[in-house]
């Protein structure tokens, strides 16, 4: 369902010139930045927590103001990837999420995940199911924001 709603929204966004997709609306993340944030959310909750990868972060990930030292995590806050580059990375991350969901059994979902002892988020234990809930909630909420902001961008004169 998440992938389905994003497919239509990305198609809609592609009707706009690429530079517009890097514009922020009222101080919120741009369309491209939103996808960079979703990469980070998956890196935090799936790759770090569920998979236990010590250094799970892609340099293009983007965190909120709570992430005060992104370079410590291996994130490049000055990165400026194109929409296509970010969407390819997102596709890879969503493939990982889909694979986990498709193969998960009840006992897998109940497994307690302990974060690696490396810089990153989260810092406390969570179950696999809790981690998946965070990823899906992030996807749903940020899709809502992206659609809201696309409506503004579409109305701007070009």
Image (cartoon, grey):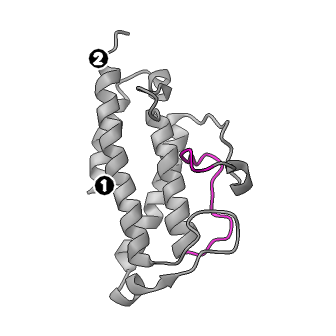
Q: Position of residue 151 (x, y in %)?
A: 28, 27
Residue identifier under label 1: 2
For the record, the magenta segment spans: 51-67
Q: Are marks 1 and 2 in contact (CB under 8 Å)?
A: no
Q: Position of residue 37 (x, y in %)?
A: 50, 47
Real-space Cα distance between discs 1 and 2? Answer: 26 Å
For the C terminus, the image quarter is top left
**Residue drawn at 58 percent across, 63 percent down:** 121
Q: Position of residue 134 (x, y in %)?
A: 40, 63
- 71 left or right of 97 in image: right
Q: Which secondary structure, mark 2? A: helix
Say if residue 12 shows up in the picture: no
**Residue 40 picture quarter:** bottom right
Q: Position of residue 11 (x, y in %)?
A: 33, 35
Most foreground residue, 105 or 144: 144
Q: Main secondary structure of the magenta part?
A: loop
For the N terminus, the image quarter is bottom left
Say if residue 30 shows up in the picture: yes
Q: Which mark is residue 155?
A: 2
Most foreground residue, 54 or 25: 25
Which callout, 1 or 2, points at the residue further toward the start of the chain? 1
In this view, the mark in front (1 or 2): 2
The answer to whether residue 103 is magenta is no
Which residue is at the far bottom? 107
Q: Which mark is residue 98?
A: none
Which residue is at the far top? 157
């Amino acid at each position: 369902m998440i992938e389905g709603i994003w497919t239509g929204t990305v198609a809609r966004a592609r009707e706009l010139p690429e530079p517009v997709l890097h514009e922020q609306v009222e101080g919120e993340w741009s369309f491209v930045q939103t996808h960079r944030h979703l990469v980070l959310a998956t890196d935090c909750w799936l790759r770090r927590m569920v998979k236990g990868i010590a250094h799970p972060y892609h340099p293009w990930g983007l965190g909120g103001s709570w992430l005060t030292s992104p370079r410590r995590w291996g994130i490049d806050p000055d990165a400026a990837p194109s929409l296509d580059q970010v969407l390819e990375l997102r596709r890879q991350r969503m493939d990982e999420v889909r694979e986990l969901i498709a193969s998960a059994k009840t006992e897998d979902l109940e497994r307690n995940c302990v974060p690696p002892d490396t810089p990153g988020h989260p810092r406390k234990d969570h179950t696999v199911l809790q981690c998946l809930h965070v990823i899906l909630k992030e996807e749903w909420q940020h899709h809502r924001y992206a659609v809201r902001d696309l409506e503004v961008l579409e109305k701007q004169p070009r």
